[in-house]
Every structure is written in structure tokens, then in C-alpha cells.
Image (cartoon, grey):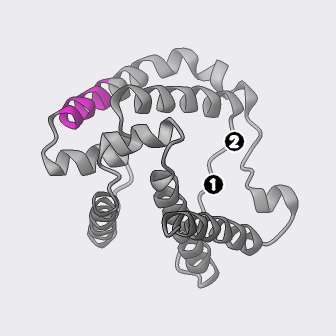
Amino acid sequence: MKRDPLGKLALGLATGTAFGAFLQRGGASDADLILEQLLLRDSAIARIMGTAAAAGSFGTHGLREAGATELDVKPFQVRSVILGGVAFGAGMAILGYCPGTTLAAVGEGRRDAMFGLLGMVAGALAFIRVYPRIKEVVEATDLGKVTLPSATRTSPWPWVAGLAGLVATATLVRHARATR
């Protein structure tokens, strides 16, 4: 088994803790706010996650260009994405949290999130047991290590800029509506 250096683990813990703190500060650990997002009544969660995705994309590609990291793109398996998306969405709709916001809510002491965390662990263990039997079926639609830049033969930077622009526009529109 490959073991990561202690510094890398500490960095992961620190960045994960900071991300959880930002989720909590932004209100993403509130199941009611997540429900409002799912019912398309409030876009705060989408803006929080969009901001995280844009910042992560900028950081990832910046670090890659600086030679500080390498991309480890996972294969695009269509059935896996669809089944995972359905399971993720159903879990989020039932519990009111996604995995990250569940941990932030556990940190706040929310009991519903604690039960959700137990459910996620149980689900992960069940998946580990079932996966060898379904592996062939879900991996049958493997399209390889595809990214939007590789599929379009473009630099990642227009995609990063587009994502950042989309998040900024959504935030400005929300702010303009709130100040009316």
C-alpha cells in the first residue's frame, strides 16, 4: 500500500478544515438552505459550490503549470457518473446535506448530520462489498481520461475563466436583486 508523506496528509487536513469552515460560514451546513436550493428557491449553495469549483480549478491548473502537482484524471465512465449522480442526489435530497456539508454540520453538533454520516459510512461499506459484482457493468461505458480541455483541444484557462465568470455573474445578479 502506498503511504503519503506526513506533510501531504497535514496539508490535506488543513485545507479540508478550511473548506469546512468556509462551508459553515457560508451557511452550507444548514439543511434548510440546501432544501431551498433543491427547490430552486435560493441559489446560495450553488454559488458557494461554484466559487469552490472555480477557485479549485484556478489553483489546480496554476499548480500544474508551476510544476508543483500533476493531474490525476479519472476515467469518464458514463454509467458510473449517472448512477453516482442519482445516489448522490437522492442522498442529498433525503438527508439535506452532501458529504462535505454533512461533516460541517457534524462539526456544529447537528444530530441529523451525525446520523447522515453513519449512513454514508454504511453506504460506502455496502458499495465496497457490491462493487466487485457490478464493476464490469458500470465500467462498460469507459470513455477514457477525458476533460473538457482535452475533448476540445483547448487550454484549461478559458474553461476556468468561464466558470469564474459564471459564478461572478450569478453573484452579481443575486446582489442586484437583493438590493432592489
Q: Amino acid at mark 2?
A: Phe
**Residue at the farthest right position:** 153
Which residue does the image show at 51% across and 20% down from the upper left? 132
Which secondary structure type mostly characterizes the magenta part of the structure? Answer: helix
Q: Quadrant of residue 143?
A: top right
Name the mark on residue 76.
Answer: 2
Q: Is residue 117 magenta?
A: yes
Q: Position of residue 162 (x, y in %)?
A: 72, 68
* Span highlighted in magenta in the image: 112-122
Kind of element beneath mark 2: loop
Q: Nearer the viewer, residue 163 or 78?
A: 163
Q: Nearer the viewer, residue 173 or 52?
A: 173
Which residue does the image show at 59% across and 58% down from the upper left? 72
Q: Amino acid at mark 1?
A: Val
Residue 1 falls left or right of residue 135: left
Q: Nearer the viewer, residue 91 or 126?
A: 91
Q: Is residue 136 above or below residue 33?
A: above
Q: Position of residue 96 (x, y in %)?
A: 36, 35
Q: Is residue 135 magenta?
A: no
Which residue does the image show at 27% across and 63% down from the upper left? 21
Which residue does the image show at 43% across and 29% down from the upper left? 93
Determine which residue is flagged by label 1.
73
Q: Position of residue 146 (x, y in %)?
A: 75, 50
Q: Position of residue 48 (x, y in %)?
A: 46, 60
